[in-house]
Image: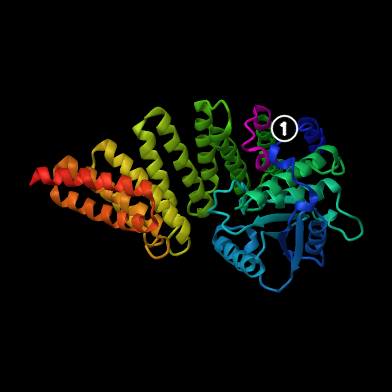
Amino acid sequence: MTVISWLQQKISNLHPRTETQTLTAADLIDFKIVVVEFLDNVESNCGEIVTRLLDSKEGLSATYYDDPFPKTFLNLESRTLFDLIDRGQSIIERSRADVLVWGCREGDKIRLNFQTEQQYENEDCAFVSLLDSLYLPAAIFSSDQPLPHAIGNLIYGAVISSINTFSKEKQIQKRYLLKKIINLLSKDDSAKNLSIDYLPYIMNFLGIIYLSYSYDNHQEKDFKIVRNLFDTALKHQDLIKNPIHLGCIYYHLGQLYDSATQNMVHRPMSYYRDAIIFYRQAQKHLSKYNYPYDYGYISYKLSELFFNYWKQKNDIQALRDAVFQLRESEKIYTYAQFPEFWSELQGRLGYLLSLLGSFTNSEEICELAIASYKNQQKVITERRDPLAWARIQEDIGEIYYRLGKESADKDLLEEALEYFHDALYIFENAEDEDEIKKLNTHIAKTSQILSLSR
C-alpha cells in the first residue's frame, strides 16, 4: 500500500467543526511565508519552485529570500543550532514572516524545515519543531515538470501546521485551510510511486497536519488516525538515519496524548502515562546538551502533565516531579534570551513551589517560591503591567501570611501586610471591587493574628 492510498483509506470522512463552516474564501487573510534560498551543491532553483508553489495556495503569500550568506548551520548539528535559530529569527523580524522555510540538499534528497517566531515558547497548539524534517526527492524539484499535487499539498499542510496563531480569527482560518488540505491529500494519489525511504518523514508530517486540525475534536476516531500515522512512521524507523528525527516522532506522540488529557471526553489516566512515556522517550534523542530548546519545552509540558496528574490523584511525588521538570526548563529558557517565557516559568514555579511548601510544611520551599515570584517581577514590573504585578504581590503576601500564621512570627505577618497593601493600592486605583474585597479580607485576618500575638 502506498503512502497516499493509506491516507485515502484512513481519513475519507472528517468530523466537522462548527467554527470552519461559516468561513469563506473571501474572509481569508494571507499568511506571510518566506522561503530562503536553499543550501544546494548543484545549480538549481528548488527554493523558487517552492515559493511559487506556496504563493499559489489559498491563504498564503510567499516571497523568496535570496540574500547571500553562509548556510552551513543547516546541517542540524547541535553546535550550529543556535546559529540557525538566530539567523532565522533575524529574517523573520525583518520580513514579518509567519513561517520561514529552509531547504537543504542531502545527497539525492531535499530536506525542508520550518521556523516561526516564538517556536519554542508558545501555547497556541502549533506542534511543529524546527527539527521536524520533511525529506523529498531532489529530482521532483525540476523546472521541467510541476511538483506532484500530493507533494505540493503536503508542503502546504506542513507550512499551515507550523503557523503560530495568537488570535481566534487566525486559528479559525488555520483550521479551515487544514481541513481543505486533508481532503485534498485523501483524494490524490499523484505521489504513489514515492520511494519507501521517505515514508517515516511523510507520515510524521501527515500526523502533524491531522493533529493540528483535530487535537481538540474530542473524537476517538481522530485520535486513532493520528496515532496510526505516527505508529506507521515508527514502524519504519530503520529508514531514519539521524536520531533527532526519531525523537521528533516520539515528541509528537507525547503531544497527541497530552492533548487527549485535556480534550477527550473520556480521559483515562493511561493518557497521562503514555504522554509522559513518549515525552521522555523524545528527550533521549533530543538531549538538553545537544538540542536544549526542544528538551526544555518538553520539560515544560511534562511539568504540566505531572501537575494535572497530582490534582487528580493527590500524589505528592507528582507535584515534586512537576517542580523538577519546570526547573529543567528554567535552566534553558533564561532571562537574557527568553525574558517573557522565563517570566512565565518563574510565575509557574512560584505557584508550584508554594503548593509544595504548604503540603510539606517546608519554610525553605516557601522561600524558594517567593524568590521565583520576585524573579517574575523583573519582567512584570509595576510600571509595565500594574495589575499583573499586584497579583504577584498578593501571591507573595499569601505565602508570608501562611508562614507567619503557622510559626506565630510577627515579622512574617508584617511582611504579608506590606505586600497586601501594595496590591490593594493598585486594585483601588483600578477600581477592581472583587480584588479590593479579597485583599481587605486578607489584611483583616493578618491584622487580627498580629493583634493577638502582641
Residue 335 in the image: state x and y as whole percent. Answer: 42, 61
Q: Is residue 444 left or right of residue 111?
A: left
Snapshot quadrant of residue 438: top left
Q: Which corner quadrant holds the N terminus?
A: top right
User: Is residue 327 among what the camera can see?
Assistant: no
Residue 96 in magenta?
Answer: no
- Residue 293 higher or lower than 383, as above or below: above
Instruction: Determine the main secondary structure of the stretch shown in magenta.
Output: helix
Toward the right, the furthest residue is 144
Question: Magenta stretch?
Answer: 210-223
Residue 119 in the image: state x and y as whole percent. Answer: 58, 55
Snapshot quadrant of residue 71: bottom right
State the residue in front, 337 or 346.
346
Residue 390 in the image: state x and y as whole percent. Answer: 35, 55
Q: Is residue 26 left or right of residue 340?
A: right
Q: Residue at x 58, y 62 (%)?
A: 85
Q: Residue at x 76, y 31 (%)?
A: 10
Secondary structure under badge 1? loop
- Residue 94 higher or lower than 240, as above or below: below
Q: Residue at x 78, y 44 (%)?
A: 181
State the residue in front, 146 or 234.
146
Q: Is residue 296 left or right of residue 61?
A: left
Q: Which residue is mark 1?
A: 15
